[in-house]
Each structure stands twice: as C-alpha cells, then as structure tokens.
Image: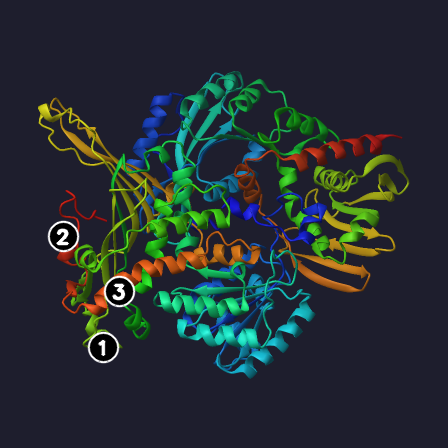
Amino acid sequence: MTVQESYVLDAPDVSRPFDAVAIEEDLKNMWKRAGDGVPTGGAIYRAALANLVVPLDPPLERKLTPVLVDVTRRHPSRLFSIAAGSAPPGAGLHARTGAICHRRESGGGLVCSEQVVLESDAASSALIPSGIRSLLIGDLPTVLLDFHPGLGLPWIDELMAMSDLVLVDSCLMEPGTEPEMWRFLRREGSRRVHDLAWARLNPWRAILAEVFDEKEYLPALGAIRSVELGFTGGAFPPPGVWLFAGWLASRLGWRTERRDAEGLILRSATGPVTLAMRGTESGEGRVLERVHVRASEPHALDVEIHHRGRDSSAHITLRTPRSETLESPFGYREFAACIVGEIQRHAANRPMEDAARAAEEMMKHWRKP
Amino acid sequence: MSARGAATAEPETRANPLREESVTLRAADPCTFIVFGASGDLTHRKLIPALFRLSKQKLLHPRTAIVGFARREFTDEAFREEMRKSVESGPPSSDWERFAERLHYHSGVFEDHGAFRSLGRLLGEIEEKRGIPGNRIFYFATPPSEYAPLTRNIGAAGLAKRALREETSAPWSRVIIEKPFGRDLQSARELNALVHLVFAERQIFRIDHYLGKETVQNILVFRLGNGIFEPLWNNRYIEQVQITVAETVGVESRAAYFETAGVSRDIFQSHMMQLLTLTAMEPPARFEADSVRDEKAKVLRTLHPMSPEEVARDTVRAQYSAGALGGTPAPGYREEPGVNPGSQTETYMAARIHVDNWRWSGVPFFLRTGKRLAKRATEIAIQFRQPPFSLFRSAGCEMLEANILRLRIQPDEGISLSFGSKSPGQELHIDPVQMDFYYLTSFGQDPPDAYERLLLDCNLGDSTLFARRDEVELAWEFMDRILDTWRADPALPMAAYPAGTWGPAEADELLHGHGTHWHRL
C-alpha cells in the first residue's frame, strides 16, 4: 500500500489526561468533522471488526506502524496503540484519538478505523488495561498483538486475560527460549493464542504439500531419508525452521533420537531420517530459505525448494526421479496479511501444537553435547 | 459454505498427510477449463478476471490450463493479449505472466464436428505437457441456442468422460451451463435430456451467478445460523415477503436475445425463483449440496399453480416507455436498437405468489423485476405482522409501521431491521428507526465476485450453489402457466411505465387489499 492510499484523520485535541468519556467524545467529534480537507471522493465509512490492542516499544513502533496501518486496511478495527513508559515521570496516563483511513478498492470513499493512542509514564503502566477496558467496543472481539519478547509484565498479563485472541511472535524471543512461548500457547490453547512464526510458514507448508500431491511422488513421503533446511540470520535455527521441522516430524510420525555430526537423527516407520539445519549470515532476517528432501529407493526422490525474501514464486528443483526445474507461485504474505489471517482463524491449531511439541523435543537433543 | 469442506475429496488428495490441515482451502484438482464462447462478453468481463484472481490466490492448481474456443481466429499469444485487457493495463505483471502460461486458444465453429476432434487433440497435448490427468470443465459461455450443438459435439468427439455412480477418481468431466436453461418446461426437459446423454447429473453445473453472491449465501446463514430469526420465519409472524430485482439498464447489446426472453425468462424464472426458494425453504438436514437443493426443490413443488384467472389477477407484465433516468432522457423499449417496434416482450414483471405449505400458508410473496427502473437494487423485504394488541392507540398512535427486515443483495450489501421507537419528547410519538449491517462497514471490504466462487466450487466438485435438474424444471413448470396464459389471452394487457420509474401502476394494485405497498428502495 502506498502512503497516498491511506489517510489519517486526527482529532484536534492533542494527548490529554486519560478520561474515557472525553475520549469517546473526541472520537464522536472527529466523525462530525470527518471529511474536512480529506480527498474522499465519496463517503467516509467508520468500520470495526475488532478491538486491536498493540503495546509498542519505541523501536518497535517505527517498524510496526506501517504494518498496523495495513492491518486496519485488511481488518478494520478500533486500534489501541500503547506506548507504555513513554511519558515523563509524573505524567500519568494520557490518550489521544485519530483514525486511519483507506480508499476503497472499488472506489467511492474511505473506510476508516478509529485509533486511540495511550501513553503512560512507567508508574502508570498498570492503569493501561483498565483504560482500554473502558474504551473497548462491546461485543467485538479483543485481539492483543503482543510483540514483547518474553512474558511476565503484569499489565501485559492483564491485557492477555481480557483478550479473546492473543497473537505472539516467537521470532522475537531470545534464540533457544521459544519453547516457553509454545508451552504458554499450549497451556492457553491454540484457539486463543497464535504464534505468527507459524503463520509465516503457511506458504512453505503449502508448497511442500503440493509437491506430494503428485500421485507419483506421494509414496516417497514414507521413504524420506534426509531433510535439509537452509535459513538466514546466523547459526541457530529460527523458530520458523524449528516449527517446520516439527511439522514434518509430527505429520510423518518421526521421533527424534539423537544428534550427530550431520544433524538430528529421527526415526520414521521405515528407517532413520537425517535432519540438517544450516544457517548463513546472509539474507534478510532469520527465515527459512531452502528445503531439500531426499527419499530412497524404491520411491527415490530428490527435490529442493528455494525461496528468497518477498519473491512471489519459489524455485523447485527436481533431481530424482528425473531432472526438472520449475517456478511455482509462493504465497508470500506481507506481515499484515499474516496477522489478519490469524485474526480470522478461529479454530484450534492442532498441527501447530504438535509441531511445537516435536520442535521442542528436537531442540532438547540439539542442545545435548 | 461449509459444504465445500464436506464435499467428497479425491482419494489421492486425502492420502497426502501434509494436506491434512487447512494450509489453504481444500486443494483443487488440476484440470483444463474449456471456455466455449471465449471471444464473448461473459468471458472478458467475468470468467477470465475470476480465473485470474483464483490463480493469483493459488486456488487453482498450478498445472490447471484454460482453453478458449470460439469462431474468431487467434493465436495463443493474441488470445492472451486480448484476455489481458480484461484484467490489467500497462506492462504485464508477473501474476499475469504466470497466468498467461495457462491460456490456450482453439478456433472453431460450434456446429463443426471436426473442430471438436482437433480440440480433443489439443487438449491431449496440453494435458500431457502440463501433467493434467484428463480432468475437464466445459464452460458454455455462449447463447443458449448453441448448447445443443456444443453438447452433441463434445459427446461425439469423446471429449467428456461420463461419470459412473460416485465420481471419486480422475479423470473427471464437468460442464457449466449458463442460464437460461431452456425457454420453457418442454425445452428445458429436452436440453436436460440432451446434456444427460453426455454428462451425469452430478457433472452438470447450471450456473446462476446470483447464487455465488455472498449476500445470497448469507440468507441461509442469517436464517439458520442465528437463533432469533428462524422461530419467527413463518406465517405466524410474517405478514408478507417482497422480492425486488431492479435494474437501471435497458437491453444494451442483448436486444436479439432479450426479445425472445423478456424479464420473465431472463430474470424471473432464474434469479427470482432462487431468491424465493432460499427465503422460503425448510432447514436442510445437512449443509451439503443435495440436502440444500432438496429443500429448494420442495419450495418450488409447493408454489401455488396459477389458473388463467389467477394469472390475470396476480401477475403484471409491462414495457418501459420513454422517460428519464438519473436526469438523462431514456428511450422507450421499442425505440431501443435491435428491438422490434411492435415488440410484445415484457421488460417488467410482478407477481403475487403463494407457497402452499404449513410454514407459509396465507403469506403472499410479492415479486417484481424490471429494466430501466429508478434504481439498481436487489433486496428481499420480510414484513412482520403487527403486535396483536395496539397498546398505544389511546396515546394517539393508531397504526404503527410494520417491522421490516431487509436483506440487501446489491448494492450496499447488508441487512437492516426497522422497528418503532419512541421519539424524544413529552408526547408519545413512535417513529420507525433502522438497525443496519453493511458488509462494507463491518468487514471493511466489498464481498468477492460471484463467478470466482462458483468456478472454484465447480473445480472442487461442490454443486451446492448450482441449480439441479428438478429445480430448473419445477421453476419452468410454474412459469409456463403464466407465460402460456399471457400468450394465449391477447386481452391481458401489456402495461407501460416510463423509464426511470418504479414500474406500472397496475403492479401497485397487486398489493391492494394487503394494506401495504411496494417498499421504497
């Protein structure tokens, strides 16, 4: 989305000491004035499918603001942006209002999401949940996007408790501590807590599944002897790689046995499977970039899938049983699309839970000397 | 619809353990779409854009191909360039380039058997090259007069595989046929019989794009997915139902077809009957294709068959005369290009219909449709009965406005409910107010295109949103009584209405005696 396609309607009042009644009044007044000076080319629609609560540290704010703007385009919401500890000591809890508007794709005006920005000094962070509670749109689900690496801030815990859906991102955890997040997810239930690291894997899982949709290659699933996962961003596999490996293991019934020089040794119903995870320093972020699967006779298969960054297609190289290369559409999704996809998914995610359990088991063996 | 998930999966898809979760929706099988009438308006405006969007969303199998078939001469390249104009301008996007690889073209005449034999060879080559296991979807995007030669030649050239019992394995063949399916009961039966020579019923997808509209699918969700409405959905609480399909356009470039069809065949027999059945049907035993269609067919069976006297009393046909629409002068129907100056084709139809069953006994269904009406609007309005006792009469509120539930199909898709509320002030005044749900303001986006949904459903083998043989024939059976009476009795007038109005005064008379009027849209 380009900047020209979105608009921000600001209520004239700047940040004011928190007063729920006054904030609702600000929002009402903002809608009364809506349209002044905004090139709408049609009506302005106020839309809300959810209450979206997002605690944002200053470094995260810069990075995530464009993402949240895009989230509101895809899933209009009353957006609560929380800058805890951003106000000087003694400032207490402040709030200001605005709206993020997007031009309708079919033309004819703007669709707007209301935004309430809450700022607090460190001592007043504990008041944030009560402030938000008083401004939630009743009957709409409350979604918490928790990008805080780690758990345990009391006011975040309170926000979690009052949310219908919590989106976390194990990619933000300290490498090696991701299982804490996954255990939390299992404890709270995968219907209520979703890990965005899993959502990013959707195109990878889809494309590998497509390979084995081929009737000819399907039997090779039972004859896989090695899987190599290539990733960017260092030597320790990112959570997406662990979850992908865990997904394969849980879908195909592999058990982790040990680690050797090549990688992890897993046991399938037909024999051992070597799982190698190889990182490079290059590339953008810590992401899965390559999957190489080899199966043995009588269902020999050698297939490698490559995908880089935001490319819209993946490169598939088939070496066995015949040589072939092809470009296949890769359903890369922008971060906002991943978030909205998870907001709109209401079911428990057993495959993810199983994958996380298997990944955790693999991590234990990986760490063993 | 959840029926999508419930549809029978192909065994090879089932067996892939990596597919045992909804990474995406159920995978569509690789297949070849063969579009007859590929140079026509429908292909340009609807089919190619819908297939392109499905491709972009990865809802088509990567190996799926599309073959256009029409009389015009095109190379594959020229056909691709022509089709690209339907979806984008400027330099080709990477999405288009990927999609264009799927597109092929075959020139031929629908009556020429040889063209179908060569089409068969082309399909074989494409299927071998792309690894498609022979699955084929034939799309008749042609005038109805071509359906018969198309079906015969597809059969004679052996292009389709007839399904035996349960179709569970590749290759499969399916055919999508556009409405109108026949022009009366007799021709619908003949066409059904002909198509059945080549395809089994479960291979036939009779498309009515209204059923692919999100808002039409929402009728059932609204009725049956919310505990508060279904208990009220009967003659005890509902006074009447009004269904309106209003168009502002005239016949445009379709005069030749429209002259032989009129709105009765073009809209009433198909779209309006579908809206009526979805409104009036009983809850199906399961949310799957045949259960839903069984219930729709039951409604059609219980429509009160009109006698000639009832046709004269309960139906109105009319033609628009010159008028003005949105501030612009509009010609009368008989002045439109391609229309016979003495035409007796109706551009407006209204009817009072009764559903003779336990649920709807005594509840009139008022249906109206027309061209060159004041607004483009499709809606179903459910008018509820008044409270049994007028509590506020003593306070001067003699007659309260009825509660009306409006299901808006287009535009401004959504639902609204009107109810009485006390106006602020010392005196007791009751004014109607509305609770509104708009797809746009609730979901922030317009509903997706109907063709996209229906093409994917056909690819997945889910026929829930397509009309079954008995539905089509029952709808014609009902319509034939009206059309036969209109034809046989020259004394029945063809009313007139100025373009840009809401139809003839005669249509208002249908509602006299019911203490109501057509709802304003």
Q: Nearer the viewer, residue B188 or A325?
A: B188
Residue at (30, 47) in percent of width and height:
B355
Distance of label 1 from label 3 (alpha carbons):
20 Å
Report which residue position mark 3 lands on. Answer: B483
Q: At label 2, which amino acid type do we have?
A: Glu
Tell me the crowding category of disc 3: few under 14, some 14 to 19, or many 20 or more residues within 10 angstroms, Cα based: some
What numbered label is drawn on residue B504? none
* Coordinates of residue A191 in the picture (x, y in percent): 58, 31
Tell me the crowding category of disc 2: few under 14, some 14 to 19, or many 20 or more residues within 10 angstroms, Cα based: some
Residue at (73, 53) in percent of width and height:
A212
Q: Nearer the viewer, residue B429 or B456?
A: B456
Above or below, B72 relative to A112: below
Q: At label 3, which amino acid type do we have?
A: Leu
Secondary structure at numbered mark 1: loop
Q: Earlier in the sequence, mark 2 or mark 3?
A: 3
What numbered label is drawn on residue B340? 1
Above or below, B159 relative to A273: below
